[in-house]
Amino acid sequence: MTKERKTEEKFAKESDTFRAYAGKKRMIFAVFTVILLALIAGIGIYNTPANRLARQIDLGRKYFTSTHEAAASASSYLDWL
């Protein structure tokens, strides 16, 4: 084997190694990008004005119901006295 042929084989081997490393690097970047986009979309959907209003109304109904039940219990207790 000539020296030139050995150099070409070594360069080809290093080139393949570099391509494999670059491919892994691109794959990691792609996965990271997809996760980041999914997170941004989820946060955006969660914080839409309609969704926020619905959550606040549900919370208000929850507290109104529990307060109303407590007031009704107190009223019936006072009527008993």
Image (cartoon, helix red, strand yellow):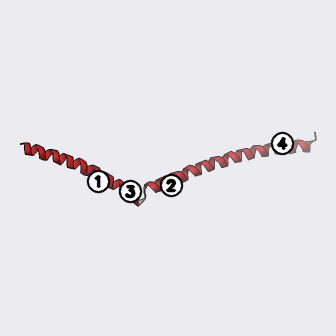
The residue under label 3 is which amino acid type?
A: Arg
Question: Is 2 left, or right, of 32 in this rendering?
Answer: right
Residue type marked 1:
Gly
Task: Tell me the tag on residue 40.
Answer: none
Q: Is residue 65 left or right of residue 72?
A: right
Please report whichever mark, 2 or 3, sits nearer to the chain's N-terminal start: 2
The numbered mark, 1 or 2, whose residue comes first in the sequence reads: 2
Classify mark 3: residues with Cα within 10 Å, few (<14), some (14-19) or many (20+). few
Label number found at residue 52: 3
Mark 1 vs 4, N-terminal side: 4
- Viewer-nearest of discs 3 and 4: 3
Determine which residue is flagged by label 4.
10
Q: Nearer the viewer, mark 1 or mark 4?
A: 1
Write down the residue under mark 1. 60
Specify the quadrant of the image occupied by residue 13: top right
Tell me what residue is drawn at x 25 percent, y 51 percent: 64
The x and y percentages for residue 8 are: 87, 45
